Image: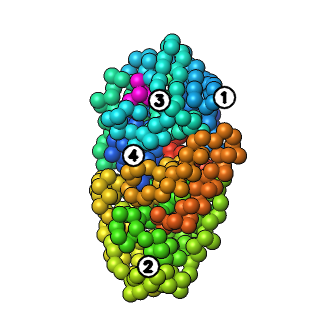
Amino acid sequence: MTRHFSTVLATALFGALLCATGTIAAPRTDAVIGMSIEPTGLDPTAAAPVAIGQVVWKNLFEGLVTIDENGKIAPALASDWAVSDDGLTYTFNLREGVSFQNGEPFNATTAKFTLERIIADDSVNPQKALYSAIESVAAPDEKTLVLTLSHPSYDLLYWLGFPAAVMVEPNSIADEATHPVGTGPFQFEAWKKGNEVTLSAFDGYWGDKPKLDKLTFRFIADPQAQAAALASGGVDAMPEFGAPELVNQFEDKAGFDVVIGSTGMEVVAGMNSTRETFSDKRVRQALMMAIDRQAIVDATNSGYGTPIGSHFSPSDAGYEDLTGVLPYDPAKAKALLAEAGYPNGFSFTMKVPNRAYAERAAEIMQAYFIQIGVTATIESSEFPATWIKDVFKDTNYDMTIIGHAEPLDIGIYARHPYYFNYDNPDFDAAMTAIADATSPDERLEGYRKAQEILAEDVPALFLYAWPKIGIWNAGLKGLWTNEPVPSNDMTEAYWSN
């Protein structure tokens, strides 16, 4: 009896040891990813919110090319490409044997359909302006796609890697927002509105199979709830943790990795230039000099983030630190207001999305403005639906605060119309020069000039570049440290234990 008991005990202990060392217990094949914002739909080619791409880009949808973690262009559904010497013809060689998740083949015909849909007169693509140089799309055979441009567009190849340019299957268009169909390694399973979206591994994927079988994107708006979900295991990762002041709780906590990276997101306080007050550059400059950007970063983001002087992130090539163009100087700010005809200040409304970073910044800016005699009334706006309608679409606002997460998006100030209602021919010319560049040096010089124009003209108050604060289970590997494109790329993710 004793011998039998000892044998059973030894076997149990040995089994437990094997499990503990991972010999028997297989690594998990699912992951739960937390996000602050639930997308309004799941078709990144038809709506603007970046939360859409953070669920489906690279996971479910793919483009002709892609952008890697280092911001470099890499092959995707196109294995290679060539650009003519005059920059007007792009020829893509497409991969063979690729199918959409509904079984339909991907080929040059479907690629042609996708791009023509983006540039069509009735297109609702949120980034349509980026692809306006495409004059025609041809599919001479099923493996070849040819783009003819009306004028050079140096950054077009980069933009073709964005979520807005992913390939779509023509028969799925009607239901794409609620039941997306792509060519990626994960396919759509379910969407529990208000809670989560679930993706599962796509058996028919053309490339390397993902190591995870199931992805769940869980939506948790409240930063305190995000921290609680991480601590309890309700989510395995918060790639963009929304509570910088709580980061230290996880820095020394066993079982968690805290990873601080960079993003291309610029937090700005946009002004409606059609409002009489904000149509005067001196007023805009005064408001810029009325606030201390570093103090805003410290107070709203626990010091995480980099003050900026233009709509450009330090992670972008060609970045210039222009915070010294209009530095914090309340006395000069008051003098400028008086010169502009507002010696006693003025009043306006800040329509602020109900996101923690924006609300915190608005309250601090409100206090700074009071010091120069300007009264700002804060009006909360539900994000994304109400804010997008009132501010982004109808431009019914005076000032707002928002993080522009689209990568390399300084060109938005040359879009007409756009919610700033900003019009500066010199800036437009700078963006044209970038498009017409024939060398990397010309391109970077163009971006430097564009930054300098905005820093002096301030169509928005440039606050800071957003950091990527990632917190996740230490056993979960393969997540991005940096975020050149807003995303939660899980295609290389796996569990190490």
**Mark 2: secondary structure:** loop
- Residue hosting label 2: 340
- Residue hosting label 4: 48
Identity of the residue drawn at 39% across and 46% down: 48
Identity of the residue drawn at 66% across and 28% down: 85
Q: Quadrant of the C terminus?
A: top right
Front disc: 1 or 4:
1
Q: Residues within 10 Å of mark 2 (few under 14, many from 20)?
A: some
- Distance from label 3 to label 2 (Cα)? 45 Å
Q: Label 4 sits on what residue type?
A: Ala
Q: Residue 360: image x %, image y %?
A: 43, 71
Circle nearer the N terminus (4, 3): 4
Q: Label 1 sits on what residue type?
A: Asp
**Mark 1: secondary structure:** loop
- Residue hosting label 1: 85
Q: Residues within 10 Å of mark 4 (few under 14, many from 20)?
A: many
Q: Which mark is residue 135?
A: 3
| Residue 163 vs residue 268, the one in the foreground | 268
**Mark 3: secondary structure:** strand
Q: Quadrant of residue 16?
A: top right
Identity of the residue drawn at 70% across and 46% down: 441
| Residue 408 vs residue 381, the one in the foreground | 408
- Distance from label 4 to label 2 (Cα)? 36 Å
Q: Residue 374: image x %, image y %?
A: 39, 81
Q: Which mark is residue 179?
A: none
User: 392 left or right of 240?
Assistant: left
Q: Quadrant of the N terminus?
A: top right
- Distance from label 4 to label 3 (Cα)? 23 Å
Q: Label 2 sits on what residue type?
A: Ala
Circle nearer the N terminus (1, 2): 1
Give the magenta-colored segment's residue range.
Answer: 113-118
Residue 117 among magenta residues:
yes
